[in-house]
Amino acid sequence: MKVQNITDIDKFFKVVDECRGKVELVTGEGDRLNLKSKLSQYVSMANIFSDGTISELEIVAYEPEDIDKLVSFMMNQ
């Protein structure tokens, strides 16, 4: 799924941390980074944004309840 205009990075990662299954960030090169890993969170975010806002990401969640959490976050942020 594509997510856009994330302005509260900390809240986004809190939602990711609450997910039961794997949540991955798909890079422009097609690599998949495990967003539940704190190291991957820091490295990927440092490379993706510099102004405090993430304009667009492609993420993959494997559990239906995790997808619901992420969609709810995007609708209510």
Image (cartoon, rainbow, N blue to C red):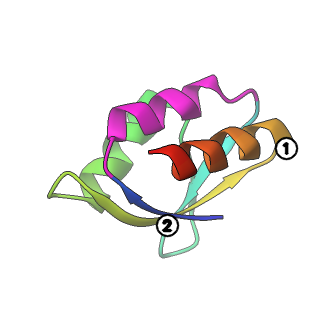
In the image, 7: left or right of 58?
A: left
Query: Amino acid under label 2?
Result: Thr
Residue 74, image x, y percentages: 53, 51
Residue 31 picture quarter: bottom right
Residue 57, image x, y percentages: 48, 64
Q: Tag 2, which secondary structure?
A: loop
User: Which quarter of the figure is the N terminus placed in?
Assistant: bottom right
The answer to which of 31 and 66 lies nearer the viewer is 66
Residue at image point 74% right, 43% down: 68
Distance (Cα) linking label 1 and label 2: 22 Å
Query: Amino acid under label 1?
Result: Pro
Task: Determine which residue is flagged by label 1.
Answer: 64
Q: As displayed, is residue 43 above or below residue 14?
A: below
Residue 34, image x, y percentages: 58, 43
Q: Residue furthest left?
A: 51
Magenta span: predominant SS is: helix
Q: As displayed, is residue 57 above or below residue 40?
A: below
The magenta span reads 7-20
